[in-house]
Each structure stands twice: as C-alpha cells, then as structure tokens.
Image (spheres, rainbow, N blue to C red):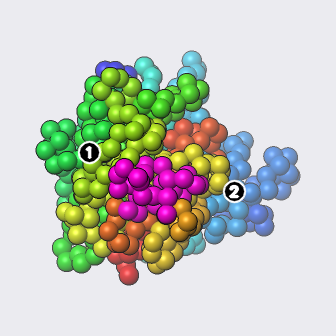
Amino acid sequence: MGDVFPRVPTPLLKVTAATGPDPGAPRVVTLDEQGNQRGWPAEPVASELITLLGATGKPGELHRLPDGSWLLGIGDGADEGGLRHAGATLSAGMGARADRTEASSAEGVSDAGRASLDASGMSEAARVALAVGLILGSHRFKVTRKQPPPPGEVLLVVPAGELAAAGEQLARASALAGATALARDLASAPSDVKSPTWLVETAAALAEDVPGLAASVRPHEWLVANGFGGMLAVGGGSSRPPALLRLTWTPPGATKHLVLVGKGITFDTGGISIKPADGMHLMRTDMAGGAAVIGAMLAIARLELPIKVTGLVPAAENHVSGSAYRPGDVVRHYDGQTTEVTNTDAEGRMVLADAIGYAVRELEPDLIVDVATLTGAMKVSLGLRTGGLFATDDPLAEALLAAGERTGEQLWRMPLLDHVAEEVPSDIADLRQIPKGPSGIGAALFLRAFTAGLPWAHLDIAGPARCEKPYREVAAGATGFAARTLTVLAEAMSAG
C-alpha cells in the first residue's frame, strides 16, 4: 500500500506536565456538576453564558467560548471513567478544529491542536484517567492518501512541587493509552497487508525500541518441526503461512512469571465452515486478542514492572482452499493432545491450544491469561461492551475484575460448568473442538484442557473488541479492549 498506509503506531496527542499555561494556546476551563469552575479566565464564565450553552458539567460536555477557550464538563472531578470521557471529548474537539483549520482557505488558526488545562488539586488517579482520555481521544486510524494533521499537545498545569510526580503519572498514562492505541492500530490494519508474518514482524520491530523487551519470531518451518498442529491446520488453507510471536520481559530479580496469550487470526473466513458474507469484512479484527497482548507487553516493559511477563501470539489466516483443514479432521497439538475438528470456524481455540501447551511445557509460568475474540455467544450473553471472564483461580479472577474496573474495560465472570466439561472428551480423539452445550463455556473448557492445572484465566472479548459507534474514550472500529487491563493486572501482581 506504499505511502498511503498509516504508520504503526499512529501519532497520538502529547500530554505534558507544566507549571504554567502555554501563552499561545487556548485554556481549558473545567466545570463540574456542582457548577464549580477551574481555569484561568480573566473573569469566571458568566452564569448567563453557561445557561445559554446548556452546560451542566456532565462529563464530556464541550463548548468553545467566545474568547477562544474551551469549557469542559468533568462530572464530579474524581470519577475516572468520567475524566477519561472528558479528556477524549476535548482532544477530539481539538482535532476537529485542527482539521477545519487545515481545510480552510482562509488564514489558519495558530492555536489549533493545542491547549492548557489546570490539573492542580487533582489526584494521581484523576490525572492519569484524564490523560488517558486525552491521548485516546486523539487516536485516528484511516487508510487514506492524505494524512491528518499532527495531534498536537495539551499541557496539564500543576504546582511546581508536584511537577516531577505529575511527569511520572503522565508517563504511566502514556504507556496505558499507547497500549490501547497500538492494539487498535494492529486490529484495524486491513488484512491485505496484515498477514501473519506482517503482524509478528511489526510487533517484533516495535519491541526493538523498548529497552529490555526481547522478541522472537518463529516461522512456518519452525512450527512444522516442533509440532504446532493447531496453527498449521488453521493456517493451511492460506497462501500466507502462520507464525508465532514471543515477547519476553525479564527484569532483574523477578520471581513471578505471568504468560499472556493472544489469538492472532489475521483474517477469518471461517474456512470450509464459511461465514456469511455479511460482516465478514470485520474479521480483520479477529486478532484483537493478540493485538491486546502486544500492546500490553510494550506497556509493561515501558513501565519497567518488576515481574517477568511473556507474551505469545499464535498468528494464522483461516482461509478456504484445497489445502484447508476439514470438519472431521483430527489435529495433534504441540503438547501431544488431539482434537476432533467439528467446525473450521472455531479456529481461535485451535491456535490458542498450541500456544498454551507451549507455555506450560517450555516457559514454567506461574499463571496464564489468554485473550481472544472467541465466541459469538459472549456477544449474546454480555452485549458489546463487556468481556467474558473464565478462571480456575479466584484470586486471579478477582485481580482481573479489579484491573478491568480501574481501566474502564468491564469484565463479567462466567462459570466453568461441570456438566459442560463432561462434553469436552471426544469419541475419536482426546478432545472435541466444540463441546455440546453453551458455546462460550465450552470453548473455555476446551482451552482449560491445555493448562495442566496451572492458575489460568480466559478473556472472551468478542463483543467489546470492536464497536460501530464511539462512546466515552472508545473509538469506532477496533477498540483495543483488554490491553490496559492486562497491563494493570501485571502492575498489580508486581506490587503484590
């Protein structure tokens, strides 16, 4: 696609701590739901103007004032979800203004894409949430001949004595938001470019820029030699072979080892059990789980978390051809277990099974978390904004629920039912690819068979991994869901 294909990662708004506003940029006046204002207007915004604008202080309300400043609603000023929403709205508004300025034939407005916001008095959590929203609100992914203008910069103004701490808070916010934005980029990339090889090599190249983060790419030949039967079966129908990505963060003195596994299906036709044409174009995002793992691994290393973390992304393209795998096949996985294939559109669990088995046998993990757009059943059960959480370990489940709550990525714990587990064994193989019963639960129980009893959790993000209409800080298209949750999970585990 040459020079029209956007850079990965795409440029993002810069958020910087400062002790005073940028004299050449608009200032942001914040308004909470109690009517309190914070900012630097020569006079407070008149109550008559606030009434005329219909401003209530609700998170995400944004108005351009006659003097060129912004009026931004922040809710109660402490709710992290509301502040992420407010930040995203402000940066989106700034971006729209920058677009209008560039497109105008008249003289441009020099302050487009810049602003200063008084963040004194905000807690650490509030500043991080606001900055995450600001950064993510600037994210744009579009394959176009004409690239958008640079996203610009926002200064968060703090007292001089808090400047160093605020800088650390914004570095954390940048790592978290960057994880989500990169996951969006990778999942949104069109599949004519995004082959399995492109995905793993792009991630490996990005890892080279992060000190201490090691990357290795295992090509098709290595997968054949080492018996990755699930990946080879799924990828066998495509002219573009599968590949395995391994990212490793090993800080000095780390004693706990977390392994993250993300589904990396770069396009999913359904194979011989082909999907309906309607909606198939969205299957470029079927590697959203793998994208979340890649984004999280870069963030974990940038934050220098004192915990060993390995990220695995089994990447393959599920296509239709004479060499595609078939319903009725029996596939041997990396750990030697065999699976009776009943539907080639249940390909995600096939590649995850290889990667989980590899983690158990080769990496000596203390616990494993996999994440995947795995079943439509989770979309039916939980809708499009909540991911399904399955876990064999209560503390791990609680840590994931807490991480999701902190990041605004909602999870709901689902059961691992014994009567469905009884359906996992196959008559002609060790395991049945699709056990009878509720399909989301059955898929999780199939994956559990490869964990060798280790503490394990499975995130089914088929619903929230993409959306048609933006909300809060969540973009339309690929959302980057779970990248921040995985990062915060590692952060919490390293602290405990």
Q: In the visual, does 460 lie left or right of 306?
A: right
Query: Secondary structure under badge 2?
Result: loop
Q: Which mark is residue 59?
A: 2
Pointer 2 local density, CA inside 10 Å: few below 14, some 14–19, many at least 20: many
Question: What stretch of residues is rendered in magenta?
Answer: 421-449
In the image, what residue type sits under mark 1? Gly
The C terminus is located in which quarter?
A: bottom left
Is 352 magenta? The answer is: no
| Vertical arrangement, residue 401 with respect to residue 54, above or below | below
The location of residue 436, given as percent across then percent down, is 54, 53
Q: Is residue 446 magenta?
A: yes
Q: Quadrant of the N terminus?
A: top left
Residue 316 visible to an observer of this rendering: no
- Kindly identify the amino acid type of the residue bearing the numbered disc 2: Pro
When asked about the image quadrant of residue 101, the answer is top right
Which label sits in the foreground, 2 or 1? Answer: 1
Give the residue pinned by disc 1.
229
Q: Residue at x 30, y 27 (%)?
A: 323
Residue 198 vs residue 181, the one in the foreground: 198
